[in-house]
Amino acid sequence: MTYDIIKASTIFQCKKCGDCCKGYGGTYLTPDDVEAISRFIHTSPDTFIEEYCQISGKRPVIRQNKKGYCIFWDEICTIHPVKPKMCREWPFIRPVLADIRNWEIMAGSCPGIHTDFPDEVIKTIVEDELSKKH
Ligand code: SF4
Ligand code: SF4
């Protein structure tokens, strides 16, 4: 196989299983995320943080339900148009560039991630995807 034609969608296709919306240390929110989500659900940023978040290390994290899922997960992401930066970027995230072994580890909990490509190919795609989002 020639690796020149490999795209992001070749190494990752979301299966919509919701596993990444469960547990996993929580979903951190940037100030922009807080603004966008609170507007989307028609509340104020302060009320949103109070009612939908908990604070972890001074940053807001979306609360989880009793089953350990993000409270916005209901067989789909119910805030998909404004989902947090962390969710939008997955799995093309900086820790993969810092250590490619993170791709393998992430694949262990995300059935959409494919690992059968050379490390350099995966890193190049992750770099490209990150550059598109910043
Ligand atoms: S765990 Fe992976 S495949 Fe499943 S919903 Fe999350 S990103 Fe998609
Ligand atoms: S905001 Fe959406 S994509 Fe992100 S963890 Fe919650 S349900 Fe999943």
Image (tube, rainbow, N blue to C red):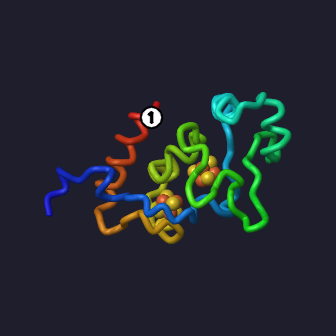
Residue at screen point 23% across, 53% down: 6
Residue at screen point 51% across, 44% down: 88
Q: Residue furthest bottom?
A: 108
Q: Position of residue 78 (x, y in %)?
A: 60, 48
Q: In this rendering, does residue 102 appear at all?
A: no
Q: Quadrant of residue 112?
A: bottom left
Residue tagged 1: 133
Query: Is the residue marked 1 within 8 Å of ligand 2, measured from its CB?
Result: no
Q: Quadrant of residue 37?
A: top right
Residue 95 as seen in the image, left or right of residue 45: left
Mark 1 crowd level (few <14, some 14–19, many ≥20, 10 Å Cα): few
Decide which of 37, 75 is in the foreground and name it: 75
Residue at screen point 38% across, 42% down: 129
Residue 37 as seen in the image, left or right of residue 65: left
Relative to residue 131, is residue 116 depicted above or below? below
User: Looking at the rendering, in which quadrant would you find the N terminus?
Assistant: bottom left
Decide which of 89, 65 is in the foreground and name it: 65
The amino acid pointed to by label 1 is: Lys
